[in-house]
Amino acid sequence: MTQLTLAKAQTIISVGLAHAREKSFAPMAIAVLDARGVLKAFAAEEGTALRRADIAIGKAYGALSMGVGSRTLGKRAAERPHFISAVNNAIGGSMIPVAGGVLIRGDDNSIIGAVGVTGDTSDNDEAAALAGLAAAGLTADPS
């Protein structure tokens, strides 16, 4: 059974940040949550905006809460804004429905956690998450 260990969470962060530097992205913040939504690991580069931790966690938490990546949540927000607003209220206002929140799937396709990345464009945030997950040997589900 695939597990989201602290070592893998730290790999997600270190490789995600290295990817961001290699591509000259803006300063990034990366949060890794376990399947319960508990913060497993977090890092923010120098120069990130004040509330980037909350945004990274919100992208990951929203993905966990709804069982789909935050890119899909963004599409749903455009199509059904009242529904996403209601869900956001139901989960305490902590959902950020834009790309950069990626689910982590186990060998049996169960959700074992999520990564949230913020700092650059949403597409670049998601790319950093995917790079970190690949390096950690974990299955990413950005849907």
Image: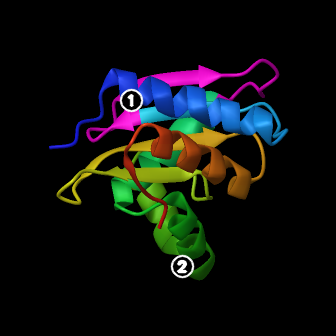
What residue is rendered at 83% in x and 37% in y? Answer: 26
Residue 94 seen anywhere in this rendered image of the structure? no
Q: Where residue 33 sits: x, y (%)? A: 39, 35
When asked about the image quadrant of residue 40, the answer is top left
Three-letter amino acid code at the position of disc 2: Arg
| Residue 131, placed above or below residue 78 | above
Disc number placed over residue 8 in the picture, else none: 1
* Residue 7 lies in the magenta stretch: no
Q: Residue furthest bottom?
A: 79
Task: Report which quarter residue 35 is drawn in.
Answer: top left
Callout 2 secondary element: loop
Does 76 sit above or below residue 116? below
- Where residue 95 appears, as percent x and y from the top left, is 51, 50
Marks 1/2: CA distance?
35 Å
Percent position of residue 123, x then y: 70, 58
The residue sitting at the top extreme is 46
Residue found 74% across the figure and 24% down from its top:
50
* Front residue of 137 and 71: 137
Rendering coords of residue 125 (x, y %): 67, 48
Determine which residue is flagged by label 2. Answer: 80
Side of 75 where 36 appears, left or right: left
Nearer to us: label 1 or label 2:
1
Disc 1 and disc 2 in contact, CB within 8 angstroms? no
Q: In this picture, which residue range is highlighted in magenta?
A: 33-52
Q: Is residue 38 part of the magenta span, yes or no?
A: yes
User: In the image, is residue 26 above or below residue 11?
Assistant: below
Image coloring type: rainbow
The residue drawn where x is 34% and y is 61% is 67
**Element at label 1:** helix
Nearest the viewer among 31 and 138 is 138
**Image quadrant in which you'd find residue 112:** top left
On residue 116, the disc is none
